[in-house]
Amino acid sequence: MSERGFTILEVLVAAAALSLVLLGMSLFYTTLTRFELENNSQTYLQRQATLIEDEMRRQIEEATATSMAVPCSGGGLSADSLEVTNSRGTYCFRRDAASTTATGLLEDRPDGGGGTWNLLSGTLATLTTTTGTCPALVAGACPSPMPASSGGFCPCLLKDNGGAIVGAAMTFRLSARLPGTDSFQTMTFTTTIAARN
């Protein structure tokens, strides 16, 4: 019976092979974790955009064709804003220009006690923070993708061949920080909503 053990070279080769296997497994785990974070963040942003679009649709669809304006009337409001008047009163959807780090999408409401609601309040998502106003519109449609000079929310009015307002188009860009990282998931959404009346 042989009592020969392993040589140092054999031990080093086995340790190197085991290290490579463990490194590969850790890279695979890290990649899967990152993919899951990005996928969850993307799903979250899509849900937030749906909530925003539903609220805008609720107000715009009940508006009359002549009761929308870009920007909202009144002083000191963001140029990239949309005013909608329906049977409940006048609503203004506008970017929160007061903050330079985490802007929100505000809705000035006449009903339910009035006041201003942040459509992104209590969530991780924010409008992407950029500067400037909506670019010049071409053929009554918001540009897509939104240029960097935009403020994160670009509304515009849709008109028929006679120049009558028939609805509105909005482009907005949402961002959310990936948990545990310094990275952000950013998505741009464009929706068109027609007035029913």
Image (cartoon, helix red, strand yellow):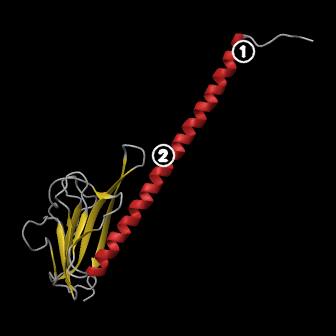
Q: Quadrant of residue 118?
A: bottom left
Give the percent coordinates (x, y) of residue 2. 89, 11
Is residue 78 shown above or below 165? above
Secondary structure found at label 2: helix
Q: Quadrant of residue 94?
A: bottom left
102 relative to 15 in the view: left or right: left
- Where is mark 1, residue-wise? 10
Q: Nearer the viewer, residue 139 or 113?
A: 113
- The quadrant of the picture occupied by the C terminus is bottom left
Give the percent coordinates (x, y) of residue 75. 6, 69
70 relative to 51 in the view: left or right: left
139 relative to 61 in the view: left or right: left
Q: Nearer the viewer, residue 187 or 127?
A: 127
Q: Nearer the viewer, residue 21 or 111?
A: 111
- The quadrant of the picture occupied by the N terminus is top right
Q: Amino acid under label 2?
A: Arg
Q: Amino acid under label 1?
A: Glu
Give the percent coordinates (x, y) of residue 73. 10, 74
Looking at the rendered structure, which numbered label has been put on residue 34? 2
Q: CA distance from mark 2 to mark 1?
A: 36 Å
Q: Residue at x 35, y 61 (%)?
A: 123
Neighbourhood count class around disc 2 (C-alpha, 10 Å): few under 14, some 14–19, many 20 upward: some
Give the percent coordinates (x, y) of residue 140. 19, 71
Q: Residue at x 54, y 46 (%)?
A: 32
Neighbourhood count class around disc 1 (C-alpha, 10 Å): few under 14, some 14–19, many 20 upward: few
- Count the numbered circles shown: 2
Q: Residue at x 17, y 59 (%)?
A: 97
Q: Nearer the viewer, residue 174 or 100?
A: 100
Q: Residue at x 26, y 83 (%)?
A: 195
Looking at the rendered structure, which numbered label has been put on residue 20? none
Which residue occupies the extreme front position in the image?
113
